Image: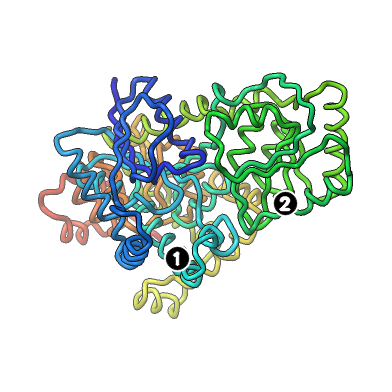
């Protein structure tokens, strides 16, 4: 079955021209997906492509005055997103799509993607390449002109606010490392998919190239949070003949990068302990070419773990270890005329663009299926189990003052304090405690008629319980997805055709839209019958008891 996808992207800018998206599109097109890609016009696109790329001209003259005016207006009103949205919506009139995919490193063009998906009632998948929060301060904006820098924290905050607003409405989300997906999950109470960046095996591959010079290469932009000086010092102290350190920050055609890496003896990857989840494309490209990676410093995170798992090289904070690594590879180069890193081939394949395309295909197909198929939305607390799962798990008992604050301001102080204390525990211990709670406490409290009803159905959990509890229950019962959120309008953006099973009166917005509603009552059926709209197709399961 042919899938038709509308893809919206931030501009294709040099030097790499958004390799994650362009290779994804190329491989999806080869697999029979019909693709329309719209992006902002920036510079002429220098690479060949088999799918249509439509460019929208946002800046007419590219003058400094126009850039300042439109940038300030976009900061205040999100003008750039709104303008792009209007242009794309007009361009696609009369065309039908199964899904909107938005790929971005920031906020553009998230709003346009949501406008189109919402207008056409089709699912939206957001693929995030970066997060503003992953680097210290507002370093992504630090390279801007001096007169812009005082506003960078404001700009960053506006980006994050606008980004999160759309992410809450997206049908599904993916990002580039476990840190990114865990962070998104912590702020949105959803679980995105992890789809790493990677290398294209047609361009980045091992080939024996002998060289008269031992080249240590760094390719890419240098940010303020990256420091190459310790490696420069190490090279200078070694003072080896025939060794050259080259730093290239741009100007290389994309089809020449692979040859440059293969000619190098060591590839430098720079990181920062405060930069979270960053796995630079140059690591993957060196991995594909099977060239030794020298990562400085050791980020003690996902990049370091990937280097170890793939045997791609070394990640270290120690200048002496840097020098020892260089000497080891220098001896290899002296003996052979080239260096070759014996990477773990099985792990290497996990980071190829082809592998990631298969992952993305599965995510997009599942997202389309979730939206188009008939789902059963199921509450957790007092619906699947005789339990307020958060309160029982954290051993919370309310008080009159807490009840008053909740009634006045909608804030549960006792619950918030208990969750903050739990979140300070190590992640492994959190998971162990929740799994034990599920098996030892919740399973004996199953509400049997509900479990009989959901057997064999496509289940989506919708609950205001803790994110980790919802995630664990979903995994154990085989639910297709979960939403641990009080925002019912957000849930309605994901599903067009569904039944619902709940005990919760706050689920009334979902009940009104459901094909069929099953209500679990606790001696309160009469109240339910008073508030339910007459057109709702409803069935009651009466427990004959109070909740507590």
Residue 368 lies left or right of residue 442; in this view the side is left
Q: Position of residue 238 (x, y in %)?
A: 89, 44
Please state which of residues 10 and 517 is positioned toward the viewer in this rendering: 10
Q: Position of residue 183 (x, y in %)?
A: 53, 53
Question: SS at mark 2?
Answer: loop
Tag shown at residue 157: 1
Please state which of residues 302 and 11 is positioned toward the viewer in this rendering: 11
Quadrant assignment for the N terminus: top left
Picture quadrant where residue 137 is located: bottom right
Q: Nearer the viewer, mark 1 or mark 2?
A: 2
Q: Where 360 sits versus 440, above or below? A: above
The residue sitting at the left extreme is: 534
Please state which of residues 268 and 114 is positioned toward the viewer in this rendering: 268
Label 1 crowding class (10 Å Cα cut-off): few <14, some 14-19, many 20+? some
Q: Residue at x 41, y 26 (%)?
A: 48
* Pointer 1 with pointer 2, Cβ within 8 A: no
Label 2 crowding class (10 Å Cα cut-off): few <14, some 14-19, many 20+? some
Tag shown at residue 228: 2
Residue 376 visible within the image: no
Q: Position of residue 232 (x, y in %)?
A: 78, 49
Q: Position of residue 389 (x, y in %)?
A: 47, 55
Residue 386 visible within the image: yes
| Lower sequence index among marks 1 and 2 | 1
Q: Mark 1 and mark 2: span between their CA atoms?
A: 29 Å
Tag shown at residue 50: none
Residue 426 lies left or right of residue 128; in this view the side is right
Please state which of residues 531 and 364 is positioned toward the viewer in this rendering: 364
Q: Residue at x 44, y 52 (%)?
A: 106
Q: Residue at x 54, y 37 (%)?
A: 197
């Amino acid at each position: 079955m042919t899938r038709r996808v509308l893809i919206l992207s931030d501009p294709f800018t040099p030097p790499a021209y958004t390799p994650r998206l362009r290779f994804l599109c190329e491989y999806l097109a080869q697999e029979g997906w019909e693709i329309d890609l719209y992006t902002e016009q920036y510079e002429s696109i220098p690479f060949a492509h088999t799918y249509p790329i439509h460019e929208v001209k946002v800046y007419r003259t590219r003058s400094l005055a126009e850039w300042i005016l439109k940038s300030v207006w976009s900061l205040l009103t999100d003008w750039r997103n709104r303008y792009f949205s209007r242009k794309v919506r007009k361009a696609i009139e009369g065309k039908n799509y199964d899904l909107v995919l938005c790929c971005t490193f920031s906020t553009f063009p998230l709003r346009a993607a949501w406008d189109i998906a919402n207008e056409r009632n089709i699912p939206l998948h957001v693929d995030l390449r970066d997060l503003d929060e992953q680097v210290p301060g507002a370093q992504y904006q630090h390279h801007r002109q001096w007169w812009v820098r005082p506003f960078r924290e404001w700009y960053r905050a506006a980006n994050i606010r606008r980004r999160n607003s759309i992410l809450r409405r997206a049908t599904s989300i993916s990002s580039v490392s476990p840190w990114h997906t865990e962070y998104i999950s912590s702020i949105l109470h959803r679980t995105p998919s992890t789809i790493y960046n990677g290398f294209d095996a047609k361009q980045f591959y091992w080939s024996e190239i002998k060289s008269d010079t031992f080249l240590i290469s760094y390719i890419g932009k240098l940010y303020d949070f990256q420091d190459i000086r310790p490696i420069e010092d190490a090279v200078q102290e070694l003072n080896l003949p025939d060794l050259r350190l080259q730093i290239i920050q741009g100007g290389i055609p994309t089809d020449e990068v692979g040859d440059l890496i293969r000619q190098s003896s060591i590839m430098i990857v720079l990181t920062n302990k405060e930069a979270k989840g960053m796995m630079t494309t140059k690591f993957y490209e060196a991995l594909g070419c099977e060239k030794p990676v020298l990562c400085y410093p050791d980020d003690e995170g996902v990049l370091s773990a990937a280097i170890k798992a793939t045997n791609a090289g070394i990640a270290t904070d120690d200048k002496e270890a840097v020098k020892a690594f260089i000497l080891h590879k220098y001896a290899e180069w002296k003996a052979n005329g080239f260096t070759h890193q014996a990477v773990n081939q099985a792990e290497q394949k996990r980071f190829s663009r082809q592998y990631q395309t298969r992952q993305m295909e599965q995510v997009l197909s599942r997202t389309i299926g979730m939206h188009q198929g008939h789902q059963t939305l199921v509450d957790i607390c007092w619906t699947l189990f005789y339990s307020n799962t958060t309160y029982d798990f954290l051993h919370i008992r309310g008080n009159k003052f807490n009840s008053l604050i909740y009634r006045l301001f909608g804030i549960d102080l006792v619950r918030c304090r208990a969750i903050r204390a739990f979140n300070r525990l190590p992640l492994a211990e959190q998971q162990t405690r929740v799994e034990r709670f599920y098996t030892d406490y919740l399973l004996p409290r199953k509400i049997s008629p509900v479990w009989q009803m959901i057997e064999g159905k496509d289940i989506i959990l919708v609950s205001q319980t803790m994110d980790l509890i919802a995630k664990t229950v979903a995994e154990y019962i085989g639910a297709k997805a979960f939403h641990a959120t009080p925002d019912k309008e957000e849930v309605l953006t994901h599903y067009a055709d569904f039944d619902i099973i709940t005990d919760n009166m706050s689920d009334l917005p979902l009940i009104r839209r459901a094909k069929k509603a099953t209500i679990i009552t606790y001696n309160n059926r009469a109240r339910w019958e008073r508030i339910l709209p007459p057109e709702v197709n409803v069935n009651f399961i009466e427990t004959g008891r109070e909740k507590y």
